[in-house]
Amino acid sequence: MSDASLKASPLHDRHQALGAKMADFGGWQMPIEYPGGGVLREHTAVREAVGIFDVSHLGKALVKGPGAADFVNSCFTNDLRKISPPKAQYTMCCDEETGGVVDDLIQYLRSDDEVFLVPNAANTAEVVRRLNEKLPEGVTVTDQHTEYGVIAVQGPKSFEVVEALGLPTDLEYMSFAEADWNGKPVIVLRSGYTGEKGFELVPRWQDTPAVWDALVEAMEPFGGLPCGLGARDTLRTEMGYPLHGNDLSMDITPNMARSGWAVGWKKDAFWGKDVLETRKAAKDYRLSWGLLVTGRGIPRAHCEVKDSDGKVIGEVTSGTMSPTLKQGIALALLDRDITEGTQVTIDVRGRGVEAKVVKPPFVQVETD
């Protein structure tokens, strides 16, 4: 896809002014890294101080009307009735026939009659389409993709930075507040994709540049940095968090990805419930594990994983060099008889790289 055909975030001019390396991400031209140290420097800033990420490419949609929350709850995997407003919840949209993951997303429960959704960029239209096919009378789904920006503020000093803007920080994890910043509405969610303390701020599209500028100024005393999606990927991989399209997909079910904690198995219904329950009972699928490289090499998605006899026992779904550990790490789907501590070999471009099967996360962080 050419640059001209890619969509641009409301912060595109800011990224260009900073000299960011840009790339196609889900049909959007987004910053991968900034000059002056790139992914390693940005990753370290988040682990040690604070970083801000433009994730405005993420989708936004509003489900509204009488019983909107019950309707959403009948579609997606997690159980909205386990939370109350104003809280948010990680969930998945699965295919009814196969149980494959159409998308994973965050659902903000505003009330019984209003749920705000944040899907992944490339999957927003498909999630909205599937919801529209099942809409009960009186309930509407509105695609609000370009009505709001999203800025993630992540790291040990994130509280101080958000407080400097006068925004609320006294929030439980996965709780949100509908706040005001200089007369501009901003949703503040206590959440993040790095494992660190953090927030996701959701201002209106046109207000996003002003919020970004204020955050840049507020984090300067702490040595904070604007961060690209390259660091976002290394940070989430260190935590073992799945990326849709790699570790979750139409071919990788919640069961396989060990995401059953985000499935309301006791609910009466959700898309894919029957097939996922059948597969769960049959235990006829590979499972996600972490791989910690003990040799030299960086695993990448689709690398074969072999046992000590050279038999293929799985495949890497995500792989990178951990800036924190200075070692290669990966998430991989492995045969069910594989256990923690097993020594394996990853085929990296025809060269065997030794690794050990582990349970993520690969690094421990302070979240309190």
Image (cartoon, grey):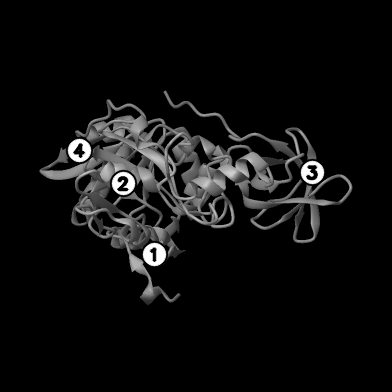
| Local crowd size for mark 3, using a 10 Å CA cut-off: few (<14), some (14–19), many (≥20) | many
Q: Quadrant of the C terminus?
A: top left
Q: Secondary structure at mark 2?
A: helix
Q: Secondary structure at mark 1?
A: strand
Given this view, does label 4 or label 2 mark the residue nearer the observer? Answer: 2
Q: What is the CA distance from the residue labelled 3 to the residue labelled 1?
A: 37 Å
**Residue type for callout 4:** Glu
The residue sitting at 69% across, 46% down in the picture is 284
Q: Nearer the viewer, residue 360 or 113?
A: 113
**Residue 71 tag number:** 2
Disc with the residue nearer the chain's start (3 vs 1)? 1
**Residue type for callout 3:** Val
Of all residues, the one furthest to the left in this rendering is 183
Q: What is the CA distance from the residue labelled 2 to the residue labelled 1?
A: 30 Å
The residue sitting at 59% across, 56% down in the picture is 251
The residue sitting at 47% across, 26% down in the picture is 366
**Residue 344 tag number:** 3
Residue 348 sits in quarter: bottom right
Q: Position of residue 4 (x, y in %)?
A: 36, 76
The residue sitting at 55% across, 46% down in the picture is 276
Q: Are marks 1 and 4 in contact (CB under 8 Å)?
A: no
User: Left or right: 261 with respect to 136?
Assistant: right
Q: Which residue is mark 1?
A: 28
Q: Are marks 3 and 4 in contact (CB under 8 Å)?
A: no
Q: Which residue is mark 4?
A: 178
Q: Quadrant of the N terminus?
A: bottom left
